[in-house]
Image: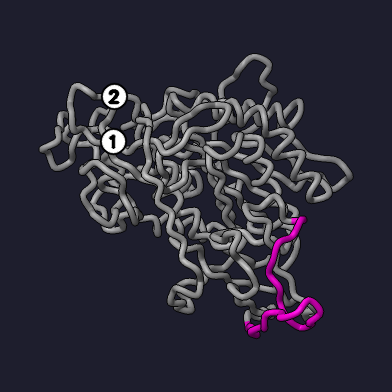
Amino acid sequence: MMKPVLTTIAAVAALTACGDREVVVGEDYQRVLDPLARDIDKLDVLFVIDTSASMQPEQQALVNAAGAQLFDQLELDLGGLPDLRLAVINTDVVLDYRGVAGCLSEDGRDNGRFRIGTRVAGCPAIDGHYLVDEDDGAGGRRRNYEGSLAEAFACAASLEIGSGCGFEHPLEAARRAFDGRYPEQLEFLRSEAMLLVVFITDEDDCSASSGELFGDASGGLDSPLGPRDSFRCFEFGVVCDDDQPRVFGEKSGCRPREDSPYLTPIETYRAFLAGLKPDPSLVMVTGMYAPPTPVVVGQDPAVTARPGTPAVLANCTAPATEVEATPAIRLDALVQQFPSRFVFESMCESEMSQRLYRIARSTAGVMSRSPCLLGNVDITTTTERCRAFDVAPDGSQRVLSGCRTTSEQGCFHVGPSQSCGYTPHGIAARYRGTLADGHRLVVDCLAPVGG
C-alpha cells in the first residue's frame, strides 16, 4: 500500500545512566550470549518477502546482493558452505478479506506455500519447491538446481511484486509455511539444523485472526473500524501510552495490543517458531524493516480529500532504493523474543548488501559459537552491566564474577572486540580461564533504556 511520508519528527532521546535507574534482576536483564553446545553445519533458511508494489526495489536489491553477501560470506565464515535448504514465501495468506482487492479469500498459490519464483528469462531449472545444496558424502555437493546458487536464488526470490495483498501477514505466512499443510513442508526442516527466518517488509505485521478486521468496506472516521486501510492494523494491533490511535501526533510506548479482538497475539508466533526445533536455541529470527520508533500518526496523504483520515507515517527511507517504511512494532516485538538469536537490520540505515553481510556473519557466528553479543545491547554494555553463568551440559549453572583487572583470571569480561565488528555494537564476552569440558559461558546484560 502507499506509504505516507513523515516530514518532521520531534527528536526526543533522554538517556538515563545505569546508576539513575532501579535495576530489577530478572526484568531489566536480557540474554545476549547463549552459545550452542556444539558447532552446527546445517542451515534451513526461510525468506518471507513482502510483495506489495512498493517493495520492487528492495526485492531486486536482495536478488543482486545475495550471492556475494549471503552465500559466499557463509562459506567464508564457516570454512565451507553449510548443508543448505532455502525456501521463499510471500506475506499473503488466505483469509476472509470481505472483498479487499488483491487479497486472497480462497485457497491459492500463496498462503505460506514455498515459491520458486517467476520463470524470468535465463532462470535455471529448480527441481522442487525449495533450494537444496548439501554435502553428498562423497566429496561433492547434492544440488537440485542448475547454474550457480546465486542464480537459483535470484529465480526463487523473484516473486510477483505488486500482486501482493496490502494487508501484509508476514508472521501468519511464516506459521503456515511450517504448519504441515503442504507435503513439501514436512521434508524441509531438519531437527539438527539451524533455522533462520528472514522477514523483509516495509510495513508492520497485520496477521489477522479472522476476517472481521476487513468488514465495513465503506467505514469512515465515525465507524468502529474506521476506513478500510492499513491503519486498522495499527489501531487494533498496537497500543500506545495514550491509547488514542486516531489522534494525530507522536506516540510513545507503542507495543503489540495482546488483547486485540482482530489480530493474533505475538506470543502465538513466538511459541510456534520456537517449537519448530527440538532445541529452541536452533531457531534464529532476523528482519529487515523500519525501526519501531518513532511513531507518528498524521493525515493520510492518499486521501487528502478527507481531512482527518489517520495514517501511520513513514519513519525512514531506505538508502539506494528510496523505499519508505513505516514502524514495524509487532514484527520487532516478535524478533526480540529470541534472545541472543535475533538480528534487526533497519531498512533505512544501510543498503541491502550490508544488511545481508551482517545477517550472514551473525548466523555463522551463532553456528560456530562465536563470543559476539547479539540481541538487545548497546554501546554502553560493559562487564559491570552484565552477569554471567558457567552452564553445564545438564543445565545446572554457576554464577561467575566479572573481571576487575586486565590480568584477573577465573572471571568474565565484556567489551569491544574487532572480531565482532559485523554486529550492531561490536561487543564480545569471554571467560578468562578454561571452562570444564562441555560447559559454556552464558551472558545476560542490562537492556538499553527504553528497550
Q: In the image, what residue type sits under mark 2?
A: Ala
- The reply, left or right, for residue 175 in relation to residue 365 is left
Q: In the image, what residue type sits under mark 1?
A: Ala
Give above or below for 30 relative to 83.
below
Instruction: Please tell me which residue lies in front, 177 or 311.
Output: 311
Q: Is residue 245 magenta?
A: no
Instruction: Please tell me which residue lies in front, 406 or 150.
Output: 406
Element at label 2: helix
Q: Position of residue 254 (x, y in %)?
A: 34, 53
Asked whether residue 52 appears in the rendered view, the answer is yes
| Residue 300, picture quadrant | top left
Q: Position of residue 433 (x, y in %)?
A: 81, 79
Asked whether residue 278 appears in the rendered view, the answer is no
Q: Which residue is mark 2?
A: 302
Sequence-earlier tag: 2 or 1: 2
Give above or below for 217 relative to 254.
above
Disc 2 to disc 1: CB gap under 8 Å: yes
- The reply, left or right, for residue 56 in relation to residue 92 is right
Which residue range is magenta in the image? 396-419
Q: Which residue is mark 1?
A: 311
Instruction: Residue at the far left: name it.
Output: 222
